[in-house]
Image (spheres, rainbow, N blue to C red):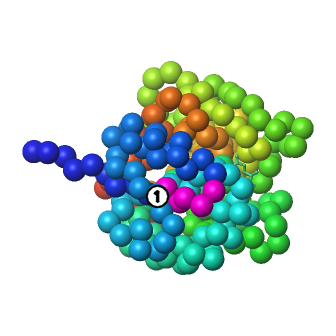
Amino acid sequence: MVKLKARIGVVAYQGAVSEHLRALERAGAEALPVKWPRDLEGLQGVVIPGGESTVIGDAMQTWGLLDALREWVRDGGAVFGTCAGAILMATEIKNGKPDQPRLGIMPLTANRNGFGRQVDSFEADICVRGIEGSAFRAVFIRAPYFEVTDPEVEVLAAVDHKVVAARYGRHLATAFHPELTDDLRIHRLFIEMATGGQKNPG
Ligand code: GLN
Protein backbone atom coordinates (compact mmCIF):
# COMPACT_ATOMS: atom_id res chain seq x y z
CA MET A 1 0.00 0.00 0.00
CA VAL A 2 1.32 3.46 -0.85
CA LYS A 3 1.65 5.63 2.25
CA LEU A 4 0.34 9.14 1.64
CA LYS A 5 2.75 11.95 2.41
CA ALA A 6 1.95 14.07 5.44
CA ARG A 7 0.92 17.60 4.46
CA ILE A 8 2.60 20.13 6.71
CA GLY A 9 2.27 23.92 6.41
CA VAL A 10 4.78 26.61 7.37
CA VAL A 11 3.51 30.04 8.47
CA ALA A 12 5.13 32.17 5.79
CA TYR A 13 5.25 35.88 6.65
CA GLN A 14 8.72 36.33 8.13
CA GLY A 15 11.65 34.31 9.46
CA ALA A 16 13.15 30.92 8.60
CA VAL A 17 10.34 29.85 6.24
CA SER A 18 12.26 28.32 3.33
CA GLU A 19 14.58 26.44 5.72
CA HIS A 20 11.59 24.71 7.34
CA LEU A 21 9.94 23.97 3.97
CA ARG A 22 13.16 22.33 2.81
CA ALA A 23 13.69 20.34 6.03
CA LEU A 24 10.08 19.04 5.96
CA GLU A 25 10.39 17.97 2.32
CA ARG A 26 13.69 16.22 3.06
CA ALA A 27 12.03 14.52 6.04
CA GLY A 28 9.41 13.06 3.67
CA ALA A 29 6.45 15.45 4.01
CA GLU A 30 4.72 17.65 1.48
CA ALA A 31 5.50 21.16 2.75
CA LEU A 32 3.32 24.15 1.91
CA PRO A 33 3.48 27.86 2.84
CA VAL A 34 0.56 29.16 4.92
CA LYS A 35 -0.64 32.78 4.82
CA TRP A 36 -4.38 32.67 4.53
CA PRO A 37 -6.84 30.76 6.74
CA ARG A 38 -7.88 28.71 3.67
CA ASP A 39 -4.27 27.44 3.37
CA LEU A 40 -4.91 25.31 6.50
CA GLU A 41 -7.31 23.04 4.62
CA GLY A 42 -6.07 19.47 4.40
CA LEU A 43 -2.97 20.02 6.56
CA GLN A 44 -2.03 17.65 9.40
CA GLY A 45 0.58 19.94 10.93
CA VAL A 46 1.70 23.58 10.92
CA VAL A 47 5.16 24.95 11.70
CA ILE A 48 5.59 28.48 13.05
CA PRO A 49 9.19 29.45 12.30
CA GLY A 50 11.74 31.50 14.18
CA GLY A 51 12.13 35.15 13.35
CA GLU A 52 10.61 37.96 15.37
CA SER A 53 7.60 36.91 17.43
CA THR A 54 6.03 40.39 17.52
CA VAL A 55 6.21 40.71 13.71
CA ILE A 56 4.94 37.18 13.00
CA GLY A 57 2.17 37.52 15.64
CA ASP A 58 1.01 40.87 14.21
CA ALA A 59 0.92 39.41 10.69
CA MET A 60 -0.99 36.33 11.87
CA GLN A 61 -3.55 38.56 13.53
CA THR A 62 -3.86 40.86 10.51
CA TRP A 63 -4.35 37.98 8.07
CA GLY A 64 -6.87 36.21 10.32
CA LEU A 65 -4.55 33.27 10.91
CA LEU A 66 -4.53 33.41 14.73
CA ASP A 67 -8.27 32.69 15.02
CA ALA A 68 -8.22 30.24 12.11
CA LEU A 69 -5.33 28.28 13.62
CA ARG A 70 -7.01 28.10 17.05
CA GLU A 71 -10.08 26.58 15.42
CA TRP A 72 -7.94 24.22 13.34
CA VAL A 73 -6.15 23.11 16.54
CA ARG A 74 -9.52 22.43 18.22
CA ASP A 75 -10.25 20.13 15.29
CA GLY A 76 -7.05 18.17 16.08
CA GLY A 77 -4.26 19.99 14.18
CA ALA A 78 -0.65 19.76 15.42
CA VAL A 79 1.63 22.82 15.75
CA PHE A 80 5.44 22.97 15.93
CA GLY A 81 6.97 26.31 16.93
CA THR A 82 10.68 27.08 16.80
CA CYS A 83 12.04 30.03 18.80
CA ALA A 84 9.76 32.97 17.91
CA GLY A 85 7.16 30.38 16.82
CA ALA A 86 7.37 28.69 20.21
CA ILE A 87 6.92 32.06 21.94
CA LEU A 88 3.69 32.51 19.96
CA MET A 89 2.40 29.11 21.13
CA ALA A 90 2.83 29.96 24.83
CA THR A 91 -0.05 31.11 27.01
CA GLU A 92 2.32 33.44 28.93
CA ILE A 93 5.16 35.56 27.52
CA LYS A 94 7.77 37.19 29.77
CA ASN A 95 9.61 40.21 28.31
CA GLY A 96 7.12 40.38 25.48
CA LYS A 97 5.56 43.56 24.17
CA PRO A 98 2.42 44.54 26.09
CA ASP A 99 -0.56 42.67 24.57
CA GLN A 100 1.70 40.96 22.04
CA PRO A 101 -0.62 38.86 19.79
CA ARG A 102 -0.15 35.14 20.31
CA LEU A 103 -1.75 31.80 19.60
CA GLY A 104 -1.63 30.73 23.27
CA ILE A 105 -2.19 26.99 22.73
CA MET A 106 0.52 25.60 25.01
CA PRO A 107 0.22 26.11 28.79
CA LEU A 108 3.74 27.34 29.54
CA THR A 109 5.63 30.60 30.01
CA ALA A 110 8.06 31.63 27.27
CA ASN A 111 10.83 33.77 28.68
CA ARG A 112 11.65 35.85 25.61
CA ASN A 113 15.41 36.46 25.06
CA GLY A 114 15.77 34.36 28.24
CA PHE A 115 19.44 33.50 27.74
CA GLY A 116 20.31 37.21 27.97
CA ARG A 117 21.27 39.78 25.41
CA GLN A 118 24.99 39.27 25.92
CA VAL A 119 24.59 35.69 24.68
CA ASP A 120 22.99 36.47 21.33
CA SER A 121 23.54 33.04 19.89
CA PHE A 122 25.23 29.78 20.77
CA GLU A 123 25.22 26.11 19.85
CA ALA A 124 24.98 23.16 22.20
CA ASP A 125 24.86 19.37 21.91
CA ILE A 126 21.74 18.37 23.78
CA CYS A 127 19.81 15.21 24.56
CA VAL A 128 16.22 15.39 23.39
CA ARG A 129 13.65 12.94 24.77
CA GLY A 130 12.10 10.94 21.95
CA ILE A 131 15.10 11.44 19.65
CA GLU A 132 17.21 8.31 19.19
CA GLY A 133 20.95 8.17 18.66
CA SER A 134 23.58 10.83 19.18
CA ALA A 135 23.09 14.23 20.81
CA PHE A 136 21.30 16.91 18.79
CA ARG A 137 23.33 19.94 17.72
CA ALA A 138 21.01 22.79 18.71
CA VAL A 139 21.40 26.34 17.35
CA PHE A 140 20.09 29.10 19.65
CA ILE A 141 19.57 32.66 18.33
CA ARG A 142 18.24 35.21 20.85
CA ALA A 143 16.39 32.23 22.16
CA PRO A 144 13.71 32.01 24.81
CA TYR A 145 13.49 29.32 27.44
CA PHE A 146 10.29 27.86 28.83
CA GLU A 147 8.90 27.66 32.35
CA VAL A 148 6.75 24.57 32.69
CA THR A 149 4.29 24.01 35.53
CA ASP A 150 1.44 22.16 33.81
CA PRO A 151 1.84 18.39 34.34
CA GLU A 152 0.48 17.72 30.84
CA VAL A 153 3.46 19.50 29.28
CA GLU A 154 6.34 17.05 28.81
CA VAL A 155 9.85 18.49 29.05
CA LEU A 156 12.00 17.08 26.21
CA ALA A 157 15.28 18.98 26.67
CA ALA A 158 17.02 21.51 28.91
CA VAL A 159 20.22 23.59 28.83
CA ASP A 160 21.61 24.87 32.16
CA HIS A 161 18.36 23.72 33.82
CA LYS A 162 16.39 25.88 31.40
CA VAL A 163 13.72 24.04 29.38
CA VAL A 164 14.37 24.38 25.64
CA ALA A 165 12.05 21.74 24.16
CA ALA A 166 8.60 20.63 25.28
CA ARG A 167 5.63 18.69 24.02
CA TYR A 168 1.92 19.08 24.77
CA GLY A 169 -0.28 16.47 23.12
CA ARG A 170 0.36 16.94 19.40
CA HIS A 171 2.19 20.26 19.85
CA LEU A 172 5.96 20.69 19.93
CA ALA A 173 7.98 23.76 20.96
CA THR A 174 11.73 24.22 20.66
CA ALA A 175 13.72 27.29 21.71
CA PHE A 176 16.36 26.33 19.14
CA HIS A 177 16.38 26.03 15.32
CA PRO A 178 16.45 22.44 14.00
CA GLU A 179 15.83 23.78 10.48
CA LEU A 180 19.29 25.38 10.44
CA THR A 181 21.18 22.07 10.63
CA ASP A 182 21.04 18.98 8.41
CA ASP A 183 19.70 16.85 11.26
CA LEU A 184 16.11 15.98 10.39
CA ARG A 185 15.24 14.00 13.54
CA ILE A 186 13.09 16.72 15.15
CA HIS A 187 11.18 17.40 11.94
CA ARG A 188 10.59 13.63 11.63
CA LEU A 189 9.34 13.54 15.23
CA PHE A 190 6.87 16.32 14.47
CA ILE A 191 5.64 14.64 11.28
CA GLU A 192 5.02 11.49 13.36
CA MET A 193 3.19 13.52 16.02
CA ALA A 194 1.04 15.27 13.41
CA THR A 195 0.01 12.04 11.74
CA GLY A 196 -0.04 9.75 14.80
CA GLY A 197 -2.72 8.71 17.24
CA GLN A 198 -2.14 11.04 20.21
CA LYS A 199 -4.79 13.72 20.69
CA ASN A 200 -4.55 17.29 21.93
CA PRO A 201 -5.28 17.60 25.67
CA GLY A 202 -8.37 19.51 26.79
N1 GLN B 1 13.87 36.82 20.31
C1 GLN B 1 13.05 36.62 19.15
C2 GLN B 1 11.60 36.98 19.43
O1 GLN B 1 11.24 37.36 20.46
C3 GLN B 1 13.11 35.18 18.67
C4 GLN B 1 14.42 34.91 17.99
C5 GLN B 1 14.37 33.77 17.03
O2 GLN B 1 13.31 33.33 16.60
N2 GLN B 1 15.53 33.30 16.63
O3 GLN B 1 10.78 36.84 18.58
Question: Please, is residue 77 above or below residue 192 in the view?
Answer: below
Q: Is residue 149 above or below residue 25?
A: below
Q: Which residues are magenta?
A: 10-14
Could you tell me which residue is drawn at 34 percent across and 55 percent down? Answer: 7
Does 12 lie within the magenta span? yes
Q: Is residue 96 left or right of residue 21?
A: right
Q: What residue sits right under mark 1 in the picture?
A: 33
Residue 142 position within the rendered picture, expressed as x and y whole percent measured from the top left: 77, 44
Q: Residue at x 53, y 42 (%)?
A: 19
Q: Nearer the viewer, residue 184 or 58?
A: 58
| Residue drawn at point x = 68 percent, y = 27 percent | 124
- Depth check: 34 or 141 in front? 34
User: Which residue lies most toward the right here?
Assistant: 118
Residue 87 x %, y %: 67, 57
Residue 193 in sight: no
In the rendered image, which quarter is residue 153 located in?
bottom right
94 relative to 18 in the view: left or right: right
When the figure is inspected, residue 159 is found, relative to residue 39, above or below; the finding is above
Is 81 placed left or right of 6 in the picture?
right
Residue 15 coordinates in the image, percent (x, y): 64, 51
Residue 57 part of the magenta segment: no
Per the image, label 1 sits on a secondary structure element best described as strand
> Residue 4: in sight, yes or no?
yes
Q: Residues within 10 Å of mark 1 (few under 14, many from 20)?
A: some
Relative image position of residue 38 (x, y in whole percent):
41, 74
- Horizontal side of residue 89 vs 134, given as left or right: right
Check the picture and name the quadrant holding the N terminus: top left
* Three-letter code, disc 1: Pro
